[in-house]
Image: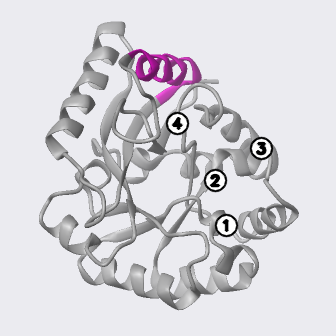
Amino acid sequence: MKKHLSDIHMHLLWGLDDGPKTREEMHEMLDEAHRQGYERIYATSHVCPGFRPFDLNVYLSRLEEASEYCLLKGYDIKVLQGAEIAWTHQAADALLRGAVPTLGRTDYVLLELWPGIPYQEALRAVRTLIGAGYIPILSHVERYQCFRWSPRKALRFREETGALFQMNAQTLLKPFSLACLYFRNRLMKSRAIDFVASDAHGVAGRPVNLDQAYDWLLQHTDKAYADRLTGFGQMMNGSDV
């Protein structure tokens, strides 16, 4: 069965963050993505607006390198813009100025909170970005203690704000704690996870593994839900995002 995988959270581009350090490592990640049946990768380098410099021109140059490698190798993979944006008070302004890429040039943004963020501060972060015209997707939602220790709060947060939830593939395959396991099961049962992504940083340690997560979803949910969680481009009405 051919898989049509879209990974909205991958640290693909070399030399920009704690992802691959060399061009060759980036190529290895793309080789593995091709083997697994990837169709879209959103290159979500870490960005921390106002606290850490982010060179958009270098980012776009590395993005082009990745696309050219796929073309050279004959891989049917689209490498698209994105960023994992750490919540700061400068985040909305950076997005509005075009200094930080959204996911595939859409209004969707991958937003990272800090693990111990209070519930009310998480609300403020999401509502600030929504007020600026963006649709926040919370990256690896299972890491935030205010949600993990109270899945009911997470469900209420998602319903009240309209924010979307991304869970890491590794959390499906091997949750890092009993609380994480319970959180995963509760949100999956409620169909409250909107995306599963690899959060890959290389070919080992935090690897490209969305195909394994897709197989897990087929076994524990159903094909329609598995396709939706791993098919961001298809969700966007087949547009080239």
Residue wearing tag 2: 225
Q: Which residues are magenta?
A: 24-38
Please, what is the three-letter code of the amino acid marked with disc 3? Answer: Leu
Q: Would you name the residue on which mark 1 appears?
A: 191
Q: Which three-letter amino acid code belongs to the residue tagged 2?
A: Tyr
| Mark earlier in primary sequence (3, 1) | 3
Q: Nearer the viewer, residue 197 or 113?
A: 113
> Is 114 located above or below residue 128 in the figure?
above
Closest to the observer, 200 or 223: 200
Q: Earlier in the sequence, mark 3 or mark 4?
A: 3
Q: Is residue 222 visible?
A: no
Local SS, label 3: helix
Q: Which residue is mark 4?
A: 201
Q: Is there a contact, CB below 8 Å, between mark 3 and mark 1?
A: no
Q: CA distance from mark 1 to mark 2?
A: 8 Å
User: Quick check: is 228 in the magenta stretch?
Assistant: no
Q: Residue at x 25, y 67 (%)?
A: 50
Tell me the kind of residue under disc 4.
Answer: His
Q: Nearer the viewer, mark 4 or mark 1?
A: 4
* Distance between mark 2 and mark 3 Cα atoms: 17 Å
- Secondary structure of the residue carrying tag 2 is helix
Q: Is residue 65 above or below residue 103?
A: above
- Position of residue 227 measured from the top left corner of the image (x, y, whole percent): 58, 45
First in sequence: mark 2 vs mark 3: 3
Query: Which quarter of the rendering shows the C terminus?
Result: top left
Answer with mark 4 or mark 1, whichever residue precedes in sequence: 1
Pointers 4 and 2 in contact (CB under 8 A)? Answer: no
**Crowdedness near tag 3: few (<14), some (14–19) or many (≥20) residues, C-alpha within 10 Å:** some
* Residue that badge 3 annotates: 173
Mark 3 vs mark 1, CA separation in Å: 17 Å
